[in-house]
Image: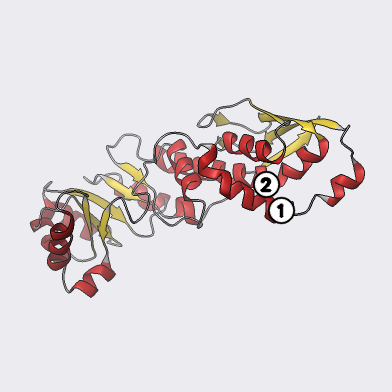
Amino acid sequence: MKGAITKADVETLVRLAIQEDIGTGDITSQAIFGEQDVSKAAVVSKQNGIVCGTEVVRYVYEIIDIGVKVTPLIADGDSISPGDRILLVEGHTISVLSGERIALNFLQRMTGIATSTAGAVSLLRNTNIALLDTRKTVPGLRKLDKYAVKTGGGTNHREALFDMVIIKDNHIKAAGSITRAVSMVRDRYGVRYPVEVEAATLDEVNEAAALGVDIIMLDNMDISMMKAAITMINKRVKIEVSGNVDEDKIKEIAGLDVDYISMGSLTHSVRAFDLSMKFY
């Protein structure tokens, strides 16, 4: 993932969210307010974190009602504290209320991802290890999830199946061996794509390293096995550590000579950030 989120990235997703949540209309707000009613609201933080998703909020309201003005007060990637106003929303009261939950759902998820990513990245501050995300995202939300990881200081791994070769356990099992799987990939693509191989044993590490692949993923290894694998690889290829990584495990891995740590929980176990929209 590179660059910021654009309207084209999220328009289909936002329209689905609008159809899901508003449908034929916000009957509560329509009963209480008319076209003449306008309101101002602020999205307020209730905890410490890293904000992410302000532009998505703007796109939500732009699609609901082009007349609603969204003014970010804090940029994506900036730190926020309890009580901080993140953005202002001003326009027809019905429109502001109708978009409230949709906007907050996006903003709370993205800010939650950015915040947890920043916390994990801080544990690697004095190392040369990059924290990677994975493809373990909610279908349809990958661009947003990966943008949030990047906003929190993480590094995006492959976006999808089409931009990098990763030979995993099931590929190896079906192909018959790592050697055969790598050979077939190279016969098909040459050096067009980087090649990563998942290894769960030291024998697999040795086989993959001898083939000169780009990255070896040490999958679900304990620390002693990781150390043995690192010695065996001897800097011939880059090393990624993966498998049930949490902050405690990051602290253990941080002292090892590896290049990457991938952490699926950044996006598959998101804790929504606590935000609210308040009229003023």
Dot label at residue 102: 2
Do the CB atoms of the residues marked 1 and 2 lie less than 8 Å apart? yes
**Colour approach in the figure:** secondary structure
Residue at the image point whose x is 80% and y is 34% from the top: 92
Residue drawn at x 36%, y 49% as measured from the top left: 250
Determine the secondary structure under disc 2: helix
Residue 252: % across, % down: 32, 50
Residue at 16% from the left image edge and 65% from the top image edge: 204
Residue 29 falls in which quadrant of the image? Answer: top right
Q: SS at mark 1?
A: helix
Give the image quarter of residue 30: top right
Q: Which is nearer the eye, 3 or 277?
A: 3
**Residue beneath disc 1:** 21
Is residue 272 visible in the rendered structure shown here? no
Spot occupied by residue 31 in the image (x, y as percentages of width and height): 91, 47
In the rendered view, tell whether residue 20 sits above or below residue 235.
Answer: below
